[in-house]
Amino acid sequence: MSTSGGALDPAAWDPTDRAFRDDPVPWYRVLREQAPVLTHPDIGVVLSRYRDIDAVLRDRRFGVATPSPWREVFAAGAPPSMHLLSENSLLFVDPPQHRRVRGLVAQAFTPRRIEAMRPRIEASVTAILDRIEDVPTFDVLEEIAWPVPITAVTDLLGVPATDQGLLHSWTHAITAVDELPLDFEVLPAAGVAADEFLAYAGDLVDARKRSPGDDLISGLIAAEEDGERLTRDELLSMIVLILLAGHDTTASLISTGLWLLLAHPDAAAEVRVDPGAVGNAVEEVLRYLGPLQVASGGGRWPDEPVTIRDTVIEPGTPVRLLLGSANRDPDQYGDPDRFDIHRGSIRHLAFGRGLHVCLGAALGRLEAQVVLPAVLQRFPDLALVDDRPTWRPSFVVRQLATLPVATGRS
């Protein structure tokens, strides 16, 4: 992992190493400074500077659809259900299919619909806090960060709350495939989860066709533009994507946000007494330690030779975009390793940019903006139990494994 004397060597960077996954920031720094365009034998070309990543996210020469022969390699090792998701999910399709699908989804997944969820999210948070009002300690992940977003997204889709445990287990199995480098041993379990998840989504679609409601699934079924509608496979893939992404990354945002605020008591005190400060605080959390450390969708693939910093990237080469590194780039932010909820002009890349900017960004922001001040106000003496956080052993998604806190109540 390092050269003699302790200096980090970009040529020795191992994205599977637990030390890197526990603390990627020092490696991001050395990659930006010494190897901003790094060709890694296992995961492809890796970009780590803000300017380069921002440019690629906007560049129409880069797509997200996996090209041959990578497509055939994945198809050979993946069950049909995983192949269906990879061929129809917004994360893995390019224009014109992407433009058509996103346009139809946007008709149902509107800002108005998201904002209308605020009272229900507030009520959900209040109910959770009422239940743990008098406990001396609790785990933020178990009690708040997981329940709030999964309740919000199941409410949005009109999915029974009693099914949340199933959705959670399917999510962990399927998202294991997104890890870099891909571990083919996780594919069978992911395939079983995808089979069950798609069958579940199919039942939801059939039920809404028989009896439409005002939920998002009914809206997706009804969406039409120029005579076009979502195909059944696109509908099922979209429902799975919303349920997957709609709670996993938001759980990361909420738990990481609360950890950072509690680790910076002045910031926590300000958000507690001035809920108006939470908007910028959430943006700083997203910049400083956003849920996605690598751009989603399996990377970007150029459709023609593209030169970045004297490196020619040929078609069919996977390009991995280190969002977590870009958001710590000193060329973009002064003193980037300082957590500052008063930071101005936070143009982070936590939700991506360009065609594939995160469709659920507004919902994730809303949930964090509701949860963080509510928790801090309910528990004015809230404190971290352990100053050293425990992280899930993941590269792509940065997520705490647990976050025990003490309420100051006996």
Image (cartoon, rainbow, N blue to C red):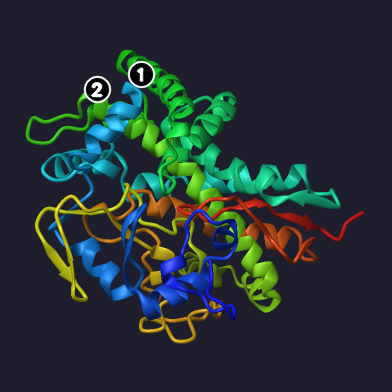
Q: Quadrant of residue 113?
A: top left
Q: In the rendered structure, which disc, 1 or 2, sits on the residue that comes first in sequence? A: 1
Q: Which residue lies most toward the front here?
A: 4
- Mark 1 lies on a secondary structure that is helix
Q: Which residue is mark 1?
A: 202
Q: Residue at x 80, y 65 (%)?
A: 381
Residue 12 drawn at (x, y percent): 46, 66
Residue 34 drawn at (x, y percent): 38, 79
Identify which residue, 364 or 241, lies in the foreground: 241
The answer to whether residue 111 is seen in the rendering is: yes
Asked if 397 appears above or below 168 in the picture, the reply is below
Query: What's the residue type where badge 1 is placed?
Result: Gly
The answer to whether residue 218 is seen in the rendering is: no
Q: Residue at x 69, y 68 (%)?
A: 262
- Mark 2 lies on a secondary structure that is helix
Residue 148 drawn at (x, y percent): 58, 44
Q: Which residue is mark 2?
A: 232
Query: What's the residue type where badge 2 is placed?
Result: Arg
